[in-house]
Image (cartoon, grey):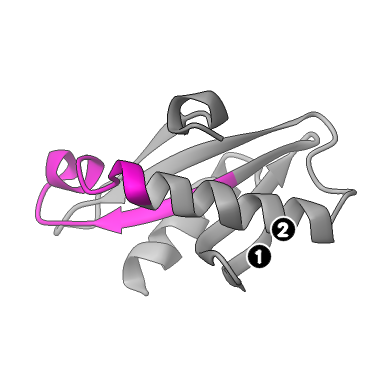
Amino acid sequence: MRAEDAAIAALEAEGWALRARRQRTAAGEIDLVAERDGLLAFVEVKARRCLAEAAMALGPRQQARLLAAAEILLADHPDWGAAGVRFDLIVVDATGRVRRIADAFRWEETGG
């Protein structure tokens, strides 16, 4: 939860508005959903000892689950993401450092 709080603070500092937190769907959970200027970001938050370990923690199976969950949310909220949709990864290390990897993966890369 501390990592998610840090991720939200980083997003809000960059002008993103939080749409949802720990959004559950039949396909799985999305940590954060944020929007800025009509661009919707589905955000996965990973916390590990170091930023590199956190960045490597998002595997193909989890990416596919996130894509499926995002499709469900977009169907339920057709007004979200008028300017587009992307998938971001926010990594947090043991000291609380936060880095965002914007557009971390795409629909076509995972077979979506």
Identified at 81% across, 54% down, the residue is 75
Q: Front-most of 110 and 89?
A: 110
**How would you rate the neighbour count of disc 1 (Cα within 10 Å): few for under 14, some for 14-19, many for 20 or more?**
some
Residue 24, placed above or below residue 75 = below
**How would you rate the neighbour count of disc 2 (Cα within 10 Å): few for under 14, some for 14-19, many for 20 or more?**
some
Residue farthest to the left, as pictured: 49
Image x and y of residue 108, in percent: 53, 25
As helix, strand or loop, the secondary structure at mark 2 comes to helix
Residue 42 in sight here: yes
Identified at 33% across, 41% down, the residue is 60
As helix, strand or loop, the secondary structure at mark 1 comes to strand
Asked if the residue at tag 2 contacts the one at tag 1, i.e. Cβ–Cβ closer than 8 Å, the answer is yes
Residue 17 in sight here: no
Residue 54, placed above or below residue 76 = above
Identified at 63% across, 51% down, the residue is 70
Placement of the N terminus among the 4 image quadrants:
bottom left
Instruction: Kindly identify which residue carries mark 2.
Output: 73
Left or right: residue 13 compared with residue 37 = left
Residue 103, placed above or below residue 31 = above
Identified at 41% across, 45% down, the residue is 63
Question: Residue flagged by tag 1: what amino acid is it?
Answer: Ala
Image x and y of residue 61, in percent: 34, 49
Q: Front-most of 31 and 7?
A: 31
Left or right: residue 55 compared with residue 45 = left
Image x and y of residue 105, in percent: 44, 30
Any magenta on residue 43? yes
Q: Which mark is residue 20?
A: 1
Placement of the C terminus among the 4 image quadrants:
top right
Q: Which residues are magenta?
A: 42-61
